[in-house]
């Protein structure tokens, strides 16, 4: 492969690029497609992707790929039939045509499920931003890549990168949802009580990692009961976490106390959502939608037919902006770093890590997650390397 004289190249640079692609109309179907390496343009860098997390959230991204623009993060030349699901992971610069970004730098951020990736990079204080034309519509948080030696969240433990790939983004979403409820989306300034005056918060899909992050934070709020809603198969695991005051299974929704409540829904299962709304009616003060861990459930029902308040989608980047405006950037970083360390350390008591590596590893990981074959106590890390 020929390289421009101004390109800096690492000996570990790949010779081709294997990419896991998902059939957009049948997201359980994936294939590994091979593509030649593109020549870098001025200001571009190539990174070898060393590891990335595969979770139920990634399946949610595929399910909402058109609606929320996830397919546009890393467009596939095979579109519209095939798409590339974004994943959180770690990668190393192996080739650079940017004078301020050196080969060898290691970064945390969003990547395709691939062997390597090319970015059009703009340096930032702690890393770089992907400024490719196709990324301009995306929130800054999705385009930011942090160099590990400048990353206040970075964990040097042997399992640190794997745990952060699996949990960092999910925990931050839970953290931000808890903060949103804590000031009722800003309404406490005008006299509304925290958590919209609720006595309990009901967490749907309580075994999901975002839900666990949320519950860990909400459990520290005075005067609030945290109720986990989960499947019978996962009930013992959820109880064992110690973050939920009560655990209820999906077949026992009618036993939930009929008191003022808020709902946070990670499942995206319309039958569960409808059942909770019907049970609580106007006692439900707020209904938040975050994910779709039940990806095989029927399409969402018409919200107009639900009892109680209409569900509202929670967009974490907007809450980041609100928190920074309220706290300042330094205080936001201090609080999130402290909370993250506590959560990651705690995860070592309830989550083990399983690696799927080599050419077949990412497809195997996707099949297991999509098929619901992974226990909530397990986190899957995938890589084309090794």
Image: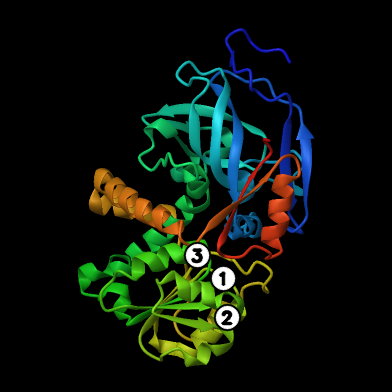
CA neighbours of label 2 inside 10 A, class few (<14), some (14 to 19), many (20+): some
Q: Earlier in the sequence, mark 3 or mark 2?
A: 2
Q: Secondary structure at mark 3?
A: loop
Q: Quadrant of residue 9?
A: top right
**For mark 1, does the 10 Å Cα neighbourhood hold few (<14), some (14 to 19), or many (20 or more) residues?**
many
User: Horizontal placement of 316 versus 131: left or right?
Assistant: left
User: Is 286 on the left or on the right of 166, as rendered?
Assistant: left
Q: Secondary structure at mark 1?
A: loop
* Disc assigned to residue 272: 2
Does the image show residue 80? no
Examine the rendering and report whether any part of residue 160 can be seen.
yes
Residue found 31% across the figure and 51% down from its top: 338
User: Vertically, is 232 above or below 82?
Assistant: below
Query: Do labels 2 and 1 touch, CB within 8 Å?
Result: yes
In the image, 103 versus 272, the foreground residue is 103
Q: Which residue is mark 3?
A: 290
| Residue 354 vertical position relative to residue 132 in the rendered view, above or below | below
x, y percentage for residue 60? Answer: 61, 60
Question: How far across and down, in percent of the image, does residue 112 sit?
Answer: 63, 41
């Amino acid at each position: 492969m020929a390289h421009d004289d101004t390109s800096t190249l690492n000996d570990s640079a790949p010779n081709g690029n294997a990419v896991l692609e998902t059939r957009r109309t049948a997201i359980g179907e994936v294939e590994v497609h091979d593509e030649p390496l593109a020549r870098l343009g001025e200001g571009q860098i190539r990174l070898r992707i060393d590891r990335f997390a595969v979770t139920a959230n990634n399946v949610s991204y595929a399910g909402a790929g058109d609606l929320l623009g996830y397919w546009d993060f890393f467009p596939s030349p095979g579109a519209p039939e095939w798409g590339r699901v974004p994943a959180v992971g770690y990668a190393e610069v192996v080739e650079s045509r940017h004078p301020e970004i050196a080969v060898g730098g290691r970064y945390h951020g969003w990547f395709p499920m691939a062997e390597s990736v090319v970015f059009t990079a703009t340096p930032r204080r702690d890393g770089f931003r992907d400024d490719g034309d196709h990324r301009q519509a995306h929130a800054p948080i999705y385009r930011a890549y942090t160099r590990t030696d400048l990353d206040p969240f970075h964990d040097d433990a042997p399992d640190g990168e794997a745990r952060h790939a699996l949990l960092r983004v999910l925990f931050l979403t839970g953290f931000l949802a808890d903060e949103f409820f804590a000031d009722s989306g800003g309404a406490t300034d005008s006299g509304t009580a925290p958590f919209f005056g609720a006595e309990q918060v009901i967490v749907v899909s309580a075994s999901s990692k975002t839900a666990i992050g949320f519950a860990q934070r909400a459990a520290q709020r005075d005067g609030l009961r945290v109720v986990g809603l989960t499947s019978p198969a996962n009930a013992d695991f959820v109880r064992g976490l110690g973050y939920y005051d009560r655990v209820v299974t999906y077949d026992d929704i009618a036993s939930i106390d009929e008191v003022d409540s808020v709902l946070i829904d990670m499942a995206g299962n319309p039958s569960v959502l409808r059942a909770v709304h019907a049970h609580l009616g106007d006692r439900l003060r707020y209904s938040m939608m975050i994910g779709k861990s039940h990806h095989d459930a029927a399409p969402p029902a018409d919200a107009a037919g639900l009892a109680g308040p209409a569900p509202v989608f929670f967009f974490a980047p907007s809450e980041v902006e609100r928190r920074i405006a309220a706290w300042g950037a330094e205080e936001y970083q201090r609080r999130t770093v402290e909370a993250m360390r506590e959560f990651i350390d705690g995860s070592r008591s309830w989550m083990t890590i399983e690696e799927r590596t080599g050419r077949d590893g990412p497809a195997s990981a996707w099949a297991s997650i999509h098929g619901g074959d992974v226990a909530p106590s397990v986190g899957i890390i995938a890589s084309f390397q090794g």
